[in-house]
Every structure is written in C-alpha cells, then in structure tokens.
Image (cartoon, coloured by chain):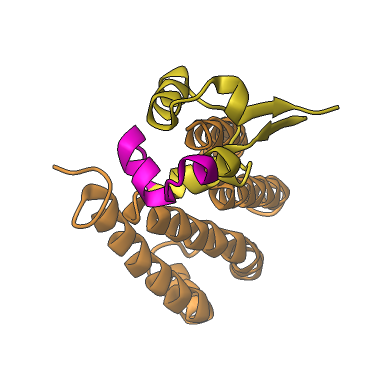
Chain colours: A orange, B yellow
Amino acid sequence: MKVTGKNSLSNFIEICLKIIFVMGIIIYIALPWLLRWYVNVFNPILNYTPALVILYVSGIPALIIVYKFIKIFETLKLDNPFVLENVRHLKVISVCSLIISIEYIIGMFFIVSIFEIILIAVFIIVWLGGYILSELLRKAVEYKEENDLTI
Amino acid sequence: MAIIVNLDVMMAKRKMSSSELAEKIGITNANLSILKTGKGKAIRFSTLDAICKALDCQPGDILEYKD
C-alpha cells in the first residue's frame, strides 16, 4: 500500500482526522449537555463545573492540534512534506500539547483521577517529541533545499 | 559568494538556446535557469563536464570569481 500521495494511507488518515475535527467541534459545542448526561449516567461523584472548565479550556488547543495535523497530512498528499510550513505546524502542535498538559496539572487540584495522570504524561511526551521532530524536519528541509539547488 | 556563472555569455557565443543546451546536458529547463540566474548553491562535476562538452569550452569560461 502506498504511504504518501493520492489514495494512500496518509490520505486515509487525513480523512479520519477531518471527521475527528468535525466531531470534535460538535462535541465542543455540545459539551455542557454531554457532560451533564455523563455525570448523571456514569459518574455521579464527578465535580461538574471544574470538569466543564477544564474540558472547555483544553478543547481549543486539542482542536488546533487536529487542525495542524490535517495541514501536515495535506502536504503529504501532495508528496511534498519537506516545507518550512510543516516545521511551524509541528511547533504549534508541541506548544498546544504543553498548554494542555499544564492545564491538566492545574486541573489535578480540582479533580484527581488516573486518566488525568495518563493524559499529562502523554501530552508531555507529545510536547517534547513534537519539538524534537520539528527541529529534525527543519534540518531535513535545509538538506532538501541544498540538494534541490545542486544542479 | 563571489562566484559568477557566465553561462549566458558562452551560450551566446556558441549561439545555443537554453532548451537546446538543457537537452544536450540532460537537465531540465527549470534547473538550467536556476544555474543561469545564479540561484543555484552548487554544481555537480558531472553537470560541469556536460556543459563544457556541449559548449566546447573550459570551466573557467563559465565560472568567474570576482572580489
């Protein structure tokens, strides 16, 4: 199976990301009702207001991350991922991950759960990984430009 | 950098068009224009070899160093 280009794996993942993005926006708008329903049905001891605030604040960086991934996969579709734009996208993704992990660390003071610790760990890893990968990509872009301009 | 590519001068002397030269040395027109406008960062020895062969000249006729 092709990994990049048209009708490839990256194309399929891009479509999945677009669906996730749209669903994320719908969930974000419907958050008060969804959370009320969740508290009533599954988790009656959950503190409604702090949970709502945490989810609302972390929702925006999360949506930005998905959006930036869509942008990166769009360049993969064109078979041209080594552009400085993607370096910027990865930087934004890593900063958003840092914001989310900080938000959840603050959230720990209000709601303590094992999922929060996992989320914090995951987003710290994405933060560091995204930053390192963006620098790696910058080097790759420089090499590619050098190579393209060697005739 | 003070290396100047004088490819147009040599091409004019030999009365050769860009596309003709590009075809002779086996590179695309786009790459040849990068070379001619001085946007290129490096030139392969094989390309230089082909240019010198096609234009029947020396590398010094194409490349020039200016302070």
Residue A39: x %, y % from top left: 47, 69
The quarter holding residue A17 reads bottom left
Specify whether residue A119 is in view: no
The residue at the far right in this view is: B67
Residue B41: x %, y % from top left: 60, 32
Residue drawn where x is 50% and y is 34% of the image = A144
Tell whether B59 sits left or right of A57. left
Quadrant the C terminus of chain B occupies: top right
Please tell me how many numbered marks the rendered image carries: 0
Range covered by the magenta-colored residues: B11-28
Residue drawn where x is 59% and y is 30% of the image = B62
Quadrant the N terminus of chain B occupies: top right
Is residue B12 a member of the stretch shown in magenta? Answer: yes
Residue drawn where x is 56% and y is 32% of the image = A146
Specify whether residue A38 is in view: yes
Q: What predominant SS class does the magenta segment belong to?
A: helix
The quarter holding residue A117 reads top right
